[in-house]
Structure formats: structure tokens, C-alpha cells
């Protein structure tokens, strides 16, 4: 079973996204902020990361940058999933190393399709 690290500080969003992921057969590991995310990556080696941007302690851009500049984690695909849906936010997310960017609210199929595509590569 493939493991997805979900980094999301909103309990409602966390539950909704985790439910979508579990329904599609993925194991879900949850981190509530950027610091927890970096610790979880070391401990669990997820196959993919779904990463919020606006979080306490460390924002998603910084988390993404750290993951993508670390040789042991740089190949883990990252899907940024944020309510920051402006073109600049999307551009900046990709510039930090994100493999995909999904703006909230999103359709389940958009998230699932993006994850499936990234895990096939």
C-alpha cells in the first residue's frame, strides 16, 4: 500500500482529504505543521506528500524547499494543495519544487488523478 503524507493544519480539511485518500487505497500519515512534516518524512518515507501552504511554525513553501533540496527526499513528489489559488501562488509553489499545485476547493477526481499521475512516473 502506498503511503501519502498529508500536511494540513485545518482539522476539517485534514479529515476531508484523508477520507478521499483512504477511499482510493492509500495509507495516510498526517502532520499538522511544517515541523511535524519534516519529522514524519524522516520516520515514514512516504511515496508522496500533499502539502498545504498556510500553516503554523513553517509554511508549505519552506517545507517544499527543504524536501526538494535534501538528496534523500528530493525525489518524493509533492502536491501543493492550498486555498491560495492565484496564478502567482501556483507559480511560486512550482518554483519551490512542487510537482503539482491544486487550489482549494477542488474536486476529488482532480486530487486523485494528480496523485495517480505522479506515482506512475
Image (cartoon, helix red, strand yellow):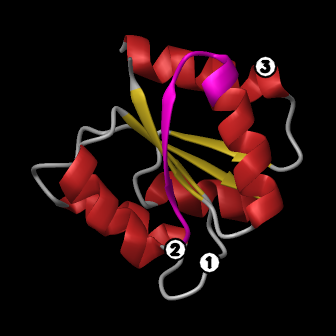
Q: Quadrant of residue 39?
A: bottom left
Element carrying mark 2 = loop
Q: Position of residue 72 (x, y in %)?
A: 11, 49
**Image side of residue 121 versus residue 53, left or right:** left
Name the image quarter holding the N terminus. top left
- In the image, 28: left or right of 80? left
Who is closer to the viewer here, 95 or 47?
Answer: 47
Residue 44 in the figure: left or right of residue 10 = left
Q: Is residue 40 above or below residue 24?
A: below
Residue at left offset 66%, top offset 40%: 18
Gap between marks 2 and 1 measured at Cα: 6 Å
Q: Farthest residue to the bottom: give it.
A: 57
Choose the circle earlier in sequence order: 2 or 1. 2
Q: Nearer the observer, disc 3 or disc 2?
A: 2
Q: Earlier in the sequence, mark 1 or mark 3?
A: 1
Label 3: few (<14), some or many (≥20) within 10 Å? few
Q: Residues within 10 Å of mark 1 (few under 14, many from 20)?
A: some
Which residue matches tag 3? 109
Q: Position of residue 103 (x, y in %)?
A: 78, 48
Provide the secondary structure element on which disc 3 rests. Answer: helix
Check residue 33 in the rendering and tell me which mark sits there, or answer none: 2
Q: Which residue is mark 1?
A: 55
Q: Secondary structure at mark 1?
A: loop
Q: Verify CB contact (< 8 Å) between mark 2 and mark 1.
A: yes
Label located before the other in sequence (3 or 2)? 2
Tags 1 and 3 touching, CB below 8 Å: no
Amino acid at each position: 500500500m502506498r503511503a501519502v503524507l498529508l500536511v494540513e493544519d485545518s482539522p476539517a480539511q485534514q479529515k476531508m482529504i484523508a477520507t478521499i485518500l483512504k477511499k482510493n487505497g492509500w495509507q495516510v500519515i498526517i502532520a499538522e505543521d511544517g515541523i511535524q512534516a519534516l519529522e514524519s518524512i524522516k520516520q515514514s518515507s512516504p511515496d508522496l506528500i500533499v502539502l498545504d501552504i498556510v500553516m503554523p511554525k513553517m509554511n508549505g513553501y519552506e517545507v517544499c524547499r527543504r524536501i526538494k533540496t535534501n538528496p534523500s527526499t528530493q525525489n518524493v513528489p509533492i502536491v501543493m494543495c492550498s486555498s491560495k489559488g492565484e496564478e502567482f501562488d501556483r507559480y511560486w509553489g512550482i518554483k519551490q519544487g512542487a510537482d503539482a499545485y491544486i487550489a482549494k476547493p477542488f474536486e476529488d477526481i482532480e486530487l486523485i488523478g494528480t496523485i495517480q499521475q505522479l506515482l506512475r512516473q
